[in-house]
Amino acid sequence: MSWFSALKAKFSPDQEIDETKIQACLEQFTFPNTHTTLQERITQLNVEQNTLQLSIFVYEDEVDHLQKIHDDLSAQLAQAGVHTLNLHVIQKKKEASKSPVPSVVDASASQAHLAQAQANYQPQQSEAPIQKAAPTQAQLKPHPHIQHVIVVASGKGGVGKSTTTVNLALALQKLGLKVGVLDADIYGPSIPTMLGNEGQSPLIENEQFVPLEAYGMPVLSIGHLTGNGRTPVAWRGPKATGALMQLFNQTLWPTLDVLLIDMPPGTGDIQLTLAQRIPVSGAVIVTTPQNVALLDAQKGIELFNKVNIKILGVVENMSTHICSNCGFEEQIFGVGGGDKLAQAYHIPLLGRLPLNASIRENADKGKPSVAAQDTAYESYMEIATKLKHSIDQLPQRQNDKRIF
């Protein structure tokens, strides 16, 4: 089969049309000022009655010759019975010329020349700088005043992580530990509201923050630095992570057994910065029983496993709801989610918390359940007792005398 037959989309010619002459014409026609034949540039052709529709491509320097090409080709095709030529043109850029073949290098050059070349080598500005690997948890130096940093994380917002953080902090304090709270949720700080010191700002001594006090605990949040709770924090990742490091490093933390860090939801910049720059002893995962929350909690656990942060246990929040009128108990968000998560990752289930209106009401008032000793008090104390047992099993960190 000829190239002409292969390219043509449809051929229903008039009796006057001579296919053989058309093919010969296209093979012999050359572009002006070149030896390129038209046949080399054809991408599609179609003959309808006595009309030839032709698609070709040309280069930028040939555009000015298109009218001449059309007229000359029409005159020649008329002898083959073509009355009308419809020319569809596609403009292309010429490929960049290939660089010349590099000269042959004598592989037998002396070692002296090679050594001299290496000594004179200067890296180009375009070369990427050598990147230093991020430190691991084992390489991080402990804080001079904090024995254990425990993060409270969820992987998902809205599961009651901040409420759990403040109540666990108060419960651990009741169990005899010196506890502090750091709010790492830069974009949505809620610790100031829950601990009743919203609107207060920390003092600064020798360019160091003096943490605020709440229920006998040192507390600090970005919310204490932005005025009222209506001021948004619209920062990109590097600035937000820089703020976290300032709150941790440039604060006059007293001697603490435990610093609880309330983490933001997700597995983003804040979590990675914390894993690479803050010495963390362990993590507590907060979830609800429903599958959507469990999926995100799993992502949080996987992240901590990758950066070698020990998971101390799971807290299942909103586990059950007891009607305040009739006492009927109902599992609104499902059953056994925390158990499944604990079994899948071989970590302890620290306990379950009810979906109770008093927990929310007291947190909104700035007096968490443990301080108010409401109906959830015993649940928080049981969880804190198990958590304290896990903390007691952690290796003691040897403090250095670093100065921030």
Image (cartoon, rainbow, N blue to C red):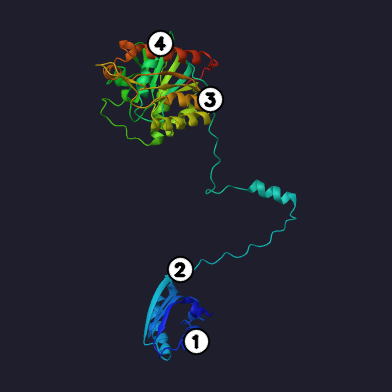
Whether label 1 touches label 2, CB < 8 Å: no
Give the alpha-carbon distance from disc 3 to disc 1, as whole Å.
80 Å
Mark 4 neighbour class, 10 Å CA radius: few under 14, some 14 to 19, many 20 or more:
some
Whether label 1 touches label 4, CB < 8 Å: no
Q: Which mark is residue 93?
A: 2
**Where is mark 1, residue-wise?**
24
SS of the residue under disc 2? loop
Q: Nearer the viewer, residue 37 or 95?
A: 37
Mark 3 neighbour class, 10 Å CA radius: few under 14, some 14 to 19, many 20 or more:
some
Question: Mark 2: which amino acid?
Answer: Lys
Residue at image coords 49%, 80%? 4
Mark 1 or mark 4, whichever is nearer to me: 1
N-term-proximal mark, 1 vs 2: 1
N-term-proximal mark, 2 vs 3: 2
Residue 42 locus on image (x, y percent): 46, 76
Residue 196 visible? The answer is: no
**Where is mark 4, residue-wise?**
173
Give the alpha-carbon distance from disc 2 to disc 4, as whole Å.
74 Å
SS of the residue under disc 3? loop
Instruction: Please give left or right for residue 189 compared with residue 398 in the image.
Output: left
Q: Which mark is residue 90?
A: none
Q: From what the image shows, is residue 43 above or below residue 385?
A: below
Q: From what the image shows, is residue 292 above or below residue 400?
A: below
**Where is mark 3, residue-wise?**
140
Give the alpha-carbon distance from disc 3 to disc 4, as whole Å.
27 Å
Mark 3 or mark 4, whichever is nearer to me: 4
Question: Mark 4: which amino acid?
Answer: Gln
